[in-house]
Image (cartoon, rainbow, N blue to C red):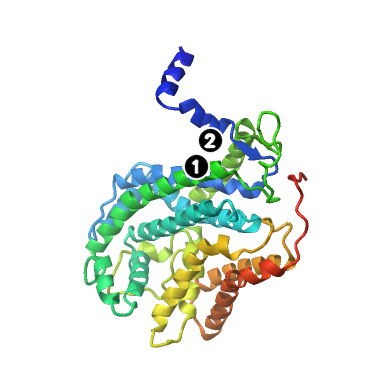
């Protein structure tokens, strides 16, 4: 009966073929390592965020008068409401930690090179959507940091020459940040952005399974096949990779629930302590900072302290901050190296990638502390080194001496 039922579905919808193509018989490279786990963990966190977000939505009130109080109601009066909220806030930080690891793995192993350019672009769109989701969700608690962080970020649009003020009013929906602003950010956070994210992630996975997964050696596993046309250096995704991923998911969830139950504030990084105060447009916090996952770009924004060509420092800082995010999409066309993996690239690629990582972490720290003349100079220096990785890549990746790449994947 089960066979007949499956045949009935397959005659009308290629269910079995789809499962085999994208799950059970999908050929995964045999040498994938721990860096490749971030992708599946991102899907797990996406499910956590969608489930917890729906439950939070049932008791949240998207108005300036009721938003903060509804969060307190969820935390104090809704049964297990505090667990659901901590699940969502911890999931937001986990989302960005994992996507940064996922992007770094792609940069390290050249997963953006031909034929995976579109795959990389789709991944970058996913990251941009996550940034938008993170910002809109950050405002919804309507605490002090939520309100003033929104004030700072939205005011950047007002610095655009000629159209800035009109654009800012249009984005806010009012002449000041108000309940109207909160309501439209709520609509974006719970409807438009999640739908867009799910769609892009779905297409991203389809594109991945079309061109095939990359591997730490950066070699084409489709080059050598057996008599059945199956690549020799691959294994079926099920059961081998599935069991491997289930183990990783179990370990990840242990860390996740440990933070959620025992360290939900994350020392003020997951939930800022100032955000436990209701929004007050007459009381500015001593130090306005965004969430930790935006702090490298916030440091870039503050690093620009001088006007240029008649453009304000604020607008130029906004441009630099936006460029710091947008530059990732150009990687497939900046890298001129004949090899993909950092294992076989030359010393210059390794040096600039290490410099990029150091710059990212230093900028992340500088974005969390108050600005001083010395810290501003440091932010300017590391902003330059951050962009040097990208802007100099066409030169050092083309002329450096690379190691010979093996014909097939290497184990061990």
Q: Position of residue 65 (x, y in %)?
A: 22, 60
Q: Name the residue under label 1.
A: 206
Rendering quarter of residue 107 = bottom right
Q: Would you place residue 189 above or below residue 30 in this image? A: below
Rendering quarter of residue 202 = top left
Q: What element carries label 2?
A: helix
Q: Residue 328 carries which label?
A: none
Tell me if label 2 and label 1 are in contact, CB under 8 Å. Answer: yes
**Residue 404 visible in the current orientation:** yes
Q: Report the residue at 38% width, 50% height from top.
A: 196
Q: Position of residue 285 (x, y in %)?
A: 37, 73
Q: Is mark 1 on a helix, strand or loop?
A: helix
Q: Name the residue under label 2.
A: 22
Position of residue 165 in the picture relative to residue 7 (left or right): left
Viewer-nearest residue: 41 or 398:
398
Quarter in which the N terminus is drawn: top left
**Residue 263 visible in the current orientation:** no
Position of residue 32 in the picture relative to residue 286 (left or right): right
Q: Would you place residue 151 above or below residue 97 in this image? A: below
Q: Report the residue at 55% width, 57% height from top.
A: 100
Q: Report the residue at 58% width, 65% height from top.
A: 334
Residue farthest top in this picture: 1
Q: Distance between the residues labelled 2 and 1?
A: 8 Å
Q: Report the residue at 61% width, 70% height from top.
A: 389
């Amino acid at each position: 009966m089960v066979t007949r039922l499956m045949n009935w579905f397959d005659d009308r919808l290629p269910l079995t073929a789809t499962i085999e193509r994208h799950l059970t018989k999908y050929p995964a490279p045999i040498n994938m390592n721990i860096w490749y786990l971030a992708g599946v963990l991102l899907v797990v966190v996406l499910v956590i965020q969608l489930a917890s977000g729906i439950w939070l939505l049932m008791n949240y009130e998207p108005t300036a008068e009721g938003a903060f109080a509804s969060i307190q109601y969820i935390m104090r009066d809704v049964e297990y409401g505090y667990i659901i909220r901590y699940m969502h806030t911890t999931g937001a930080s986990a989302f960005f930690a994992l996507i940064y690891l996922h992007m770094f793995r792609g940069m390290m192993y050249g997963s953006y090179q031909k034929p995976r350019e579109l795959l990389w672009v789709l991944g970058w769109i996913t990251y941009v959507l996550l940034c938008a989701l993170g910002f809109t969700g950050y405002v919804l608690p309507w605490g002090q940091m939520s309100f003033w962080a929104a004030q700072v970020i939205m005011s950047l649009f007002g610095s655009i020459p000629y159209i800035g003020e009109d654009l800012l009013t249009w984005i806010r929906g009012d002449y000041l940040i108000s309940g109207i602003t909160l309501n439209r950010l709520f609509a974006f956070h719970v409807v438009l952005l999640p739908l867009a994210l799910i769609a892009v992630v779905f297409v991203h996975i389809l594109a991945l399974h079309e061109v095939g997964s990359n591997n730490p050696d950066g070699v084409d596993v489709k080059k050598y096949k057996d008599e059945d046309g199956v690549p020799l250096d691959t294994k079926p995704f099920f059961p081998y990779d599935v069991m491997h991923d289930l183990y990783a998911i179990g370990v990840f969830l242990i860390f996740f629930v440990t933070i959620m139950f025992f360290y939900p504030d994350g020392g003020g990084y997951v939930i800022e302590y100032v955000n436990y105060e209701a929004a007050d447009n007459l009381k500015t916090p001593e130090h306005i900072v965004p969430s930790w996952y935006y702090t490298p770009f916030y440091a870039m924004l503050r690093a620009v302290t001088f006007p240029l060509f008649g453009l304000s420092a604020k607008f130029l800082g906004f441009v630099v901050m936006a460029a710091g995010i947008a530059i990732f999409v150009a990687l497939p066309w900046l890298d001129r190296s004949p090899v993909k993996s950092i294992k076989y690239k030359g010393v210059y690629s390794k040096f600039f990638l290490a410099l990029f990582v150091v710059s990212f972490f230093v900028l992340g720290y500088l974005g969390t502390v108050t600005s001083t003349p010395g810290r501003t100079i440091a932010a300017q220096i590391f902003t330059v080194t951050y962009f040097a990785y990208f802007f100099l890549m066409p030169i050092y990746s083309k002329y450096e001496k690379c190691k010979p790449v093996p014909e097939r994947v290497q184990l061990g």
